[in-house]
Amino acid sequence: MTTLSVGLVTYHPDRAMLRETLASLLAAAGRAKASDDLSDVTLQLVDNGNDEGLIELARQEGWKRAHLLSGQGNVGFGQGHNLVMEQGMGDLHLILNPDVSLQPDSLSRALQFMQAHPECVLLSPAMQSDGADWHFLCKRPPAVFDLFLRGFAPRWMRSMFKARMARYEMEDQGRPGVMWDPPIVSGCFMLCRAEALRQLKGFDPRYFLYFEDFDLSLRAKSFGRLAAVSDVRITHFGGGAARKGWIHVKMFCQSAWVYFGLHGWKWM
């Protein structure tokens, strides 16, 4: 059976949403244990906002094996997760956002897939957002124009480039049961083999927020295959830097500069 560690980085989280995340994760872990897919799970909460009561909140939701990392200040998303990795990981390590709700069978199906496919080093789920259809969290490497369209363009302009956006978000691939080797997957849920993460040295610390998952995805393919699995399902309530104010827009642009500087500029 498999051991699992979970890293969850917070910064002034929505408490109700965090409760939902912790409750759904615990339910999914319990189901995986009951089906003998999982022997042990530990949760590492990283408090980037010096918020009080987070470990108590986790205990209230039933997490007995939860640990809190705090006092480091706001070191960013990737660096926060790297702190977790330094504490030790299970056989598999789940990078998870505090605004994600897991389906009850999501971990069982994910662990079964990883056991059946040792060549897979990173698994991404299918996502439902705002009641829409399930879809993968995969993308092709973007051009600057793609990022502008997706994050900042008005609706009428996005509609003009609907086919381009569909290709960027890999909707042109349809909805296979498993999509092998997507170039980029989302950091809101990344189930990774711990050994691969160690060799990758986690997230690149040059990214404070945004694009660290793009970078990790592209580097991970050197250690094995990535897979998006439709039977592993989550609901994600986050996203959208432009909707979060100018500070997030600034961080988005700074990280985009780092990303394109490392992986090559492509404007259109």
Image (cartoon, rainbow, N blue to C red):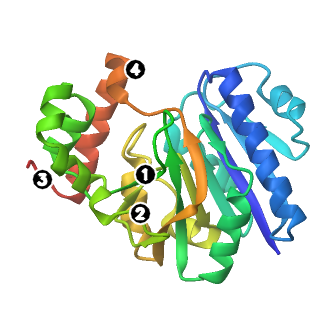
Q: Tell me what residue is drawn at x 86 percent, y 62 percent.
A: 33
Q: Which amino acid type is marked by label 2?
A: Arg
Mark count: 4
Q: Are marks 1 and 3 in contact (CB under 8 Å)?
A: no
**Residue bearing the label numbered 1:** 213
Determine the image quadrant of residue 231: bottom right
Q: Is residue 158 left or right of residue 41?
A: left
For discs 4 and 2, the disc positioned in front in the rendered view: 2
**Residue bearing the label numbered 2:** 175
**Residue bearing the label numbered 3:** 266
Cα gap from disc 1 to disc 3, whole angstroms: 18 Å
Q: Which amino acid type is marked by label 1?
A: Asp
Give whichever of discs 1 and 4 has the lower sequence position.
Answer: 1
Q: Is residue 195 above or below residue 47?
A: below
For discs 3 and 2, the disc positioned in front in the rendered view: 2
Cα gap from disc 3 to disc 2, whole angstroms: 27 Å
**Residue bearing the label numbered 4:** 244
Along the line of sight, the residue nearer the viewer: 41 or 73? 41
Give whichever of discs 3 and 4 has the lower sequence position.
Answer: 4
Cα gap from disc 4 to disc 2, whole angstroms: 30 Å
Q: Residues within 10 Å of mark 1 (few under 14, many from 20)?
A: many
Q: Tell me what residue is drawn at x 37 percent, y 59 percent.
A: 184
SS for tag 2? loop
For discs 1 and 4, the disc positioned in front in the rendered view: 4
Q: Residues within 10 Å of mark 3 (few under 14, many from 20)?
A: few
Give whichever of discs 2 and 1 has the lower sequence position.
Answer: 2
- Residue 188 x %, y %: 53, 45
